[in-house]
Amino acid sequence: MNQTLQSPAPPVETAPAARELTVALAGNPNAGKTSLFNALTGLRQKVANYPGVTVERKEGVWTLGEGGAHARLVDLPGLYSLDAASLDERIARDVLMGRAEGVPRPDVIVAVVDATNLERNLYLATQLFETGRPVVVALTMVDLAERQKLEVDAEKLSAALGVPVVPVVATQGRGLDALARAVEHAAADARGPGAGWRLSAGAEAELASLAGVGVGGNGSADGNGHGGAGGGGGPQVLTRHEALLALYGEEQAEVGELSVAVGSARERLARENPKWWQEPVLARYEWIGGVTSSAVRAPKSGGESRDATARIDRFVTHKFFGPLILLLVMLVLFQTIFSWAQLPMDLIDTGFGSLGDFVRASMPAGLLTDLIVDGVIAGVGGVLVFLPQILLLFLFISLLEDSGYMARAAFLMDRLMRGVGLHGKAFMPLLSSFACAIPGIMATRTIENPKDRLATIMIAPFMSCSARLPVYTLMIAAFFTDAKILGVVSVGVVIIMAMYLLGIVVAVAVAWVLKHTILKSPPPPLVLELPPYRLPNFSNVLHTIYSRAAMFVRRAGTVILAISILLWALVTFPRVTPDGDGADARAAASSPRAGAEEAAAAEELETRQPAGGASNIAVAAGRAGGAEGAGGQIRQSYAGRLGRFIEPTIRPLGFDWQMGIGLIASFAARETLVSTLSIVYNVGSDDAGGDEPNSLIGAVRGARKPDGTPAWTPLVAVSMMVFFVLACQCMSTIAIVRRETNTWRWPLFMVSYMLVLAYAASFITFQGGRLLGFS
């Protein structure tokens, strides 16, 4: 009676009409879920993170049928089960059970099942059946199954599973309309399928007891095996699925009565069967075997695709040839990225430079013009100049993933990664970080274990990214251009290789320390599916490139822009004027130290020219005080005062206050050091001419200390490069770490320990070199 009063009309009848349908898309990795999601939503999708966690959430709008009705399609993380062993699995389970913040409980679940690998894919489907929500099976890869001469009878499979089964080929648009109709019908019916499979009699009795529908229960069961509500306001009972999770799940219940009941049930089951915890897995697969045997007819051979995959894997996963092939693939990948990206990077750099010149010519001289040109335009250009490398990197990563090779790369690298306590999946994020640490850190989302993921994030910035190359190039061009080893090998090439190797070695050592201390966890096993080789889906590749590029510009670009404006202010204020600060500036300029610097700079006056580059933050100082007053302006600016303030700290590394300004500015972006030094040494007035590469190089060579000795030496240059290898001088990287870890604790820890390592290594390099007579 009470139940009737509380529910005068079945809510399932009115829910679909009252609001937009929510449909969850769930499936195994490599089952074609991404292709199906993209085909159903097109560009009407968005990417975000689930509240409070770093697991990525993709949502899109799906038009159902000819009537134009829309559904909210939620793409769950690719997973193999709902047993909540990883963060992805916990998030997916929370969404399906209606416990995820910001996502309503799905009206319908679309289970994506690979037709070429039914038994493994149906394991997850059996768990989806138990959530109490309507389920529609989207049978993907049917075109591959046809080529393998694998016959899957969708009608028989549907009858055996008790849910609609719709064959689809997302890339060809086959079956998408039928899938939409099936989802609409399932939402209207609003009934979930039964479990289908059953445990032993003793285990079923324990489940019934826990669910409140058997011995000692106070409720009743519906036809699907779900516990009904008890009458008279009694305690709410568990569904069969919740009882199954409580009894066999790894998470121990904390509620008093339930915890005691679960413990007692486990003891009784253990007395009957020592391996009682394996029973659900065995029972599911036994039932799945019966389902597939009735609906699938396999060819006598393994099929052409499987045979071709096996033949390729004999070489690709070979102990000797596999690593060589992987090395060759990586060399081609990086060479292609750096060579193909150069032209668009130059065009973007030139475009932003021309835009800045146009704005400066169109607007009256003043602070507003300087802010727009040197803060906003230069800041945005400093980010977008690296966008071609990011796009190419994700292009190749997407191609490798879609083709099936990425799983082989992780398999080959697992042994090396495990040696330092990392997961095999850490290989690709670290590899990506050689182009830019930002996409590398974002790529750690594929690592299930939170501690393994954190360890990978903490060492990713050690990989020498492309932003460090301008610093290496400047130092080598100034002091090591003509040096040869044995008259053949360039010292500069050896130094660059040494910088890359230094970053790798330190990263490995830090990973070992982290995994044996604050991020200690058991050696992670690599459970990995090796999918068959297939042609990449270029639609998926384009979607990936688009979404990642947008995320990079949105997350990193905003941070760089803000920091660029801040640094512009630091080198622009306080202004040098004829009175007040100007007197201090003239007094400073007349000092022996400043005189030595100006004398050294005068030697290069005829050849100086703006060093160029995307990051022109420091140019603001020269324009604020005029070309002649650039030295006084930079010295009296807040940035100059900061440089002089930190000079006692960095002097043991061989650095002076002018280099200190470059170090401070480079926290916005590493390559900013080059353009900052060009103003610090008064290189490049607007009317300067000469050979562009020699301007800053000559100024670095000619820079003098107050006593007249060179400020820069080959040893100081090496010390600077070592510092840049190990220091985390990139605000966008810090911002991404903050975004990915959802706390400031880890990015601050990363900056601190990397700064300590960089300082110690640079100190040892400079002081050790002096002791060895290299000063």
Image: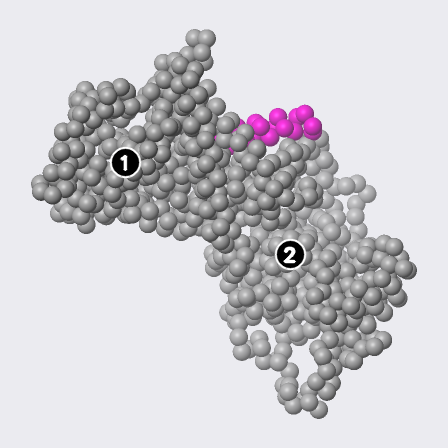
Residue drawn 53% across the image and 54% down it:
54
Disc 1 on helix, strand or loop?
A: helix
Which residue is the site of mark 1? 644
Give the image's coloring scheme. Answer: one colour
| Residue 589 point in image, percent of width and height | 15, 31
Does the rendering let one see residue 552? no
96 relative to 492 in the view: left or right: right
Q: Nearer the viewer, residue 568 or 29?
A: 568
Q: Quadrant of residue 400?
A: top right
Residue drawn 25% across the image and 24% down it:
705
Q: Tell me, yes or no, whether the two marked residues, 1 and 2, touch with CB atoms within 8 Å.
A: no
Q: Nearer the viewer, mark 1 or mark 2?
A: 1
Q: Which mark is residue 89?
A: 2
Q: Nearer the viewer, residue 400 or 64?
A: 400
Residue type pointed to by label 1: Arg
620 relative to 520 in the view: left or right: left
Outermost right residue? 272
Q: Residues within 10 Å of mark 1 (few under 14, many from 20)?
A: some
Q: CA distance from mark 1 to mark 2?
A: 53 Å
Disc 2 on helix, strand or loop?
A: helix
Residue type pointed to by label 2: Glu
Q: Residues within 10 Å of mark 2 (few under 14, many from 20)?
A: many
Q: Is residue 135 above or below residue 554?
A: below
Does the rendering let one see residue 284? yes
**Where are the magenta residues, as a range?**
318-336
Residue drawn 71% across the image and 53% down it:
121
